[in-house]
Amino acid sequence: MKITRREFLKYTGVALGSFALRDFIYPLESQATLPFTVTKYSGNPVLVPTGINGDYDEATVRDASFIKVGGIYNILYTSWTDVKGASMRATSNSPFGPYTRQGVYYPTSGTTIDGAPGNPFILYTGGKWHAWGDVIPKGYAGTWRRSVCYMSQDGSADTIPSSFSWGTERLIDGDGTGWTAANTSHCNNVGGIAGVSTPKVYPKDGGGWIMFLCATDCSVAYYGVGYATATDIAGPWTVNTASQVIAGGSYLAEQIAYFTYNGKHYLITNQVSTLTSDLWQCDTQTGIYTLAQTDFIPKGTGSQWDASQMGVVALEGYNLNNGILYGLYDAIYPTHNWDRKIGIFTLTAPSISGASINLGTGGSIIGGTGGTINLQ
């Protein structure tokens, strides 16, 4: 993997002389094997179903997002039972728990939707808390048709709202063009429109906001990753229906986690057909992402609770240049069909420990003020 002189200076604090060899070599097999470290917490899972008849989260906890507010870690998650569901919240003083359930977080019904919102995601900007999720449009219960909902409330950055009330039940609908068009040979009951789901919102390069979205289709559950953009975080949002950042079709992406590192952009998805998580990368935020690593968050082995499927992934923050991010994943636990538990992992940025430098004939290294090189 070739490293430029600028990158060498950034990592080491020294400058390469004009005749230094051009390669600064990481101990990597190829550029496709990225030097991120994923470590699953040994005490996982950190959040499990209650098993109590009548609880919203009696049977499954899944589809989580993760945010630290005022020193408190908040897991926002979707709960299911055979008869009802809700978006819930649990809190802890430590990312590793223990977590205390705080109850229902989003409204559980609406006038233009069927059921409760799922896939909760929130952030704070401009003196307001903003909240999104996905919902089933009215009349489409039992299908994979989805829309994006939105709520907001005034507040302070260090105090998370205890719950949200309705704002816009259906902020974004698929319009049936591009990747929001359903496969009508399988989906006559959704009117030719696929859903847009699992909204994740971040600052957009160059200004404004970007919302990464999965497409939904009643024949294949989830497929591909697209995005919408807005100047104002409250909308209106414009879905880029012309192309996706991860093309659909054979790739079934159920969720998205986004982060940046060293000027590049990354998406973590879970592949429904292989039941694994994948890492994708791109030089630009809205470009076409390429597959960089499969089984990025490794499944468990043997009879471990997360051996069956690596599910939805979420990150607390999105800038890995600080060195570490905490993340969540959910997994189907054996003998419980589609019921899930939630675990935590750490995502760590690479270091140059173990690197080597070949200066070649006539090569030199010119040290900057205080510059050092560690060739462990």
Image: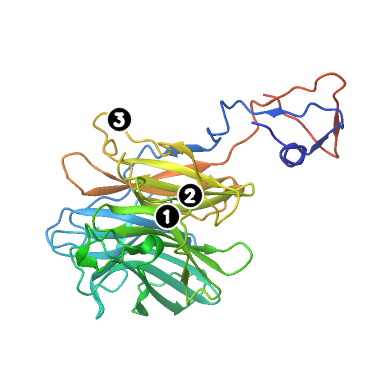
Give the mark nearer the N terminus: 1 vs 3: 1
- Give the residue type that dot 2 points to: Leu
The residue under label 3 is: 301
Labels 2 and 3 touching (C-beta < 8 A) = no
Which x, y percent locates residue 349? 57, 41
> Dot 1: what SS?
strand
Cα–Cα span, label 2 and label 1: 10 Å
Does residue 75 appear in the picture of this structure? no
**Where in the figure is residue 124, as x and y percent of width and height?**
50, 70
Quarter of the image with the C terminus is: top right
Of residues 49 and 271, which is closer to you in this image? Answer: 271
Instruction: Name the residue that disc number 1 marks.
Output: 225
Apparent side of residue 260 relative to residue 46 in the rendered image (left or right): right
In the rendered structure, which amino acid carries the disc numbered 3?
Answer: Thr
Of tags 2 and 1, the one toward the viewer is: 1
Q: Are marks 2 and 1 in contact (CB under 8 Å)?
A: yes
Q: For the residue carrying disc 1, how many other residues have a C-alpha within 10 Å: few (<14), some (14-19), or many (20+)?
A: many
